[in-house]
């Protein structure tokens, strides 16, 4: 499962937002920075949601906003003709920090730091293998079981459900199971990308 294959469709959907951002004078770097700020607030909200479950709904809204802004910065750069390697670097660095703060917030909310560490490493290795392929001369790899778009959608959907499914399902809550998915499937996705890259280099 990966939603990255629908990137071209998403780019068409956000055309009005790109035009609006250009009109108000937003730069792609400003949008990237705003996306991280939104993610950081989402992470804090998820942390607090451990005690106040209805806050998961606020976190879900913020995660979806982060996803929209993540699409918007690149599209805005192309629209303005300001795409650059520096902007691409900033975007990727802030995306990784956004992933970290969201997952740390989720793990803190359910009080399971070990599971949070496993999930963070899975997510970071997935992203690392995607960009490392480009560093060794292959196109950037977006494929695999779980890309960033998939993760954001899963976080948003689980956060919408979490206030109403508070009982544990086996050893974990619904949020805990989400972290399990990120931990297990994240590493499997990283292995997929590694295998694809090694085959391309051989």
Image (spheres, grey):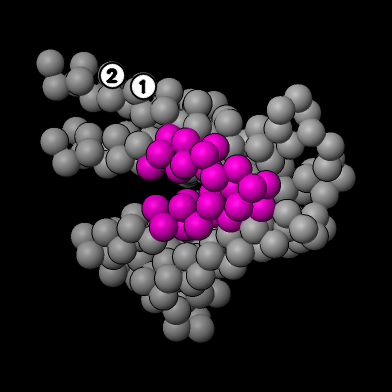
**Magenta segment:** 95-124
Q: What element carries label 1?
A: helix
Identify which residue, 131 or 181, lies in the foreground: 181
Residue 18 seen from this side: no
Asked if the residue under mark 1 is in contact with the one under mark 2, i.e. CB atoms within 8 Å, the reply is yes
* Quarter of the picture holding the C terminus: top left
Which disc, if any, is residue 195? Answer: 2
Label 1: few (<14), some (14–19) or many (≥20) C-alpha neighbours in 10 Å: some
Q: Which residue lies furthest to the right in this view?
A: 164
Element carrying mark 2: helix
Q: Is residue 116 magenta?
A: yes
Residue at figure coordinates x 50%, y 26% from the top left: 184
In this rendering, the answer to whether 196 lies above or below 44 is above
Q: Name the residue under label 1.
A: 192
Q: Which residue is drawn at 58% across and 37% down?
A: 179
In the image, is 99 to the left or to the right of 192?
Answer: right
Locate the N terminus by quadrant: top right
Q: Residue at x 54, y 37 (%)?
A: 115
Residue 143 falls in image quadrant: top left
């Amino acid at each position: 499962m990966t939603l990255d294959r629908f990137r071209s469709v998403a780019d068409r959907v956000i055309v009005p937002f790109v035009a609006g951002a250009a009109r108000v004078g937003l730069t792609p770097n400003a949008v990237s920075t705003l996306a991280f700020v939104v993610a950081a607030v989402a992470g804090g909200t998820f942390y607090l949601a451990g005690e106040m479950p209805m806050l998961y709904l606020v976190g879900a809204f913020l995660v979806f906003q982060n996803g929209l802004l993540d699409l918007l910065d690149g599209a805005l750069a192309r629209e303005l003709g300001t795409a650059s390697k520096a902007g691409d670097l900033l975007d990727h660095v802030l995306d990784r920090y956004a992933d970290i703060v969201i997952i740390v917030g989720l793990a803190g909310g359910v009080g399971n730091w070990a599971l949070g560490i496993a999930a963070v490493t899975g997510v970071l290795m997935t992203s690392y293998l995607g960009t490392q392929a480009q560093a060794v001369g292959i196109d950037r790899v977006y494929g695999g079981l779980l890309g960033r778009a998939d993760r954001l959608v899963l976080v948003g959907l689980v956060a919408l459900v979490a206030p109403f499914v508070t009982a544990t399902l086996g050893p974990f809550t619904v949020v805990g199971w989400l972290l399990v998915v990120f931990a297990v499937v994240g590493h499997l996705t990283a292995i997929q990308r590694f295998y694809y890259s090694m085959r391309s280099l051989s």
